């Protein structure tokens, strides 16, 4: 096989892989619409969480983003954040719904505060309804709005 043929095959394989990934919805940041406002980020990020898609979720974080979990764990970097969400999905993700979301900030930096309702079901225990409150710190980059830090806490919902 000539060098030109080898290059052509390599390009075709890479293109086919990328297209199948995009068509399957598995491409992280590349398959997403660029969030041009914090509100766009809320809508797109929430859809990724509800779909339990670790690749799409990780695509909203910067390379050096930090995630502070309710268990006191500090997860740093987009790849590690993706791994954390992938583990959660692999363990059977609980049903999750967005209760409310608010955003604020300026043209370069912003913040999102949102609350999720979920059910935590551990083996041998009664399922427990919980709320997860999260604060996301955002930065407007050339690729759109991205999360630089995310801190969340899980708590019992208020009694009605």
Image: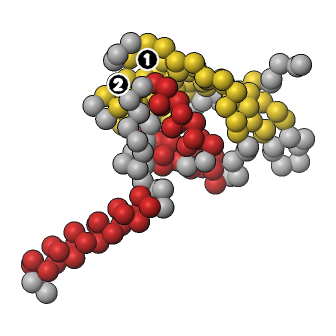
Rendering quarter of residue 121: top right
What residue sits 89% from the left and 19% below the top? 160
Q: Which mark is residue 140?
A: 2
Disc 1: CA contacts within 10 A as few (<14), some (14-19) or many (>=20): some
* Secondary-structure class at tag 1: strand
Position of 67 relative to 10 (above/below): above
What residue sits 46% from the left and 21% below the top? 137
Q: Position of residue 82 (x, y in %)?
A: 49, 45
* Secondary-structure class at tag 2: strand
Position of 46 relative to 160 (above/below): below
Question: In the drawing, does residue 111 fall left or right of residue 6?
Answer: right
Question: In the drawing, does residue 154 fall left or right of residue 129?
Answer: left
Q: Position of residue 86 (x, y in %)?
A: 56, 50
Rendering quarter of residue 4: bottom left
Q: Position of residue 32 (x, y in %)?
A: 42, 45
Q: CA distance from mark 2 to mark 1?
A: 8 Å
Q: Which mark is residue 110?
A: 1
What residue sits 36% from the left and 48% below the top? 30
Q: Position of residue 26 (x, y in %)?
A: 47, 56
């Amino acid at each position: 096989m000539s060098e030109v043929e080898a290059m052509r095959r390599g390009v075709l394989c890479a293109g086919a892989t990328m297209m199948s990934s995009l068509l399957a919805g598995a491409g992280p940041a590349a398959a997403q619409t660029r969030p041009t406002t914090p509100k766009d980020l809320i809508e797109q990020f929430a859809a990724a969480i509800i779909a339990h898609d670790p690749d799409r979720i990780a695509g909203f974080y910067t390379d050096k983003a930090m995630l502070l979990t309710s268990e006191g764990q500090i997860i740093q970097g987009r790849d590690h954040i993706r791994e954390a969400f992938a583990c959660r999905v692999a363990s059977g993700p609980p049903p999750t719904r967005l209760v409310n979301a608010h955003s604020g900030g300026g043209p370069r930096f912003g913040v999102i505060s949102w609350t999720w309702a979920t059910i935590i079901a551990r083996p041998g225990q009664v399922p427990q309804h919980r709320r997860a409150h999260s604060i996301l710190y955002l930065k407007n980059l050339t690729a759109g709005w991205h999360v630089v830090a995310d801190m969340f806490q899980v708590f019992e919902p208020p009694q009605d």
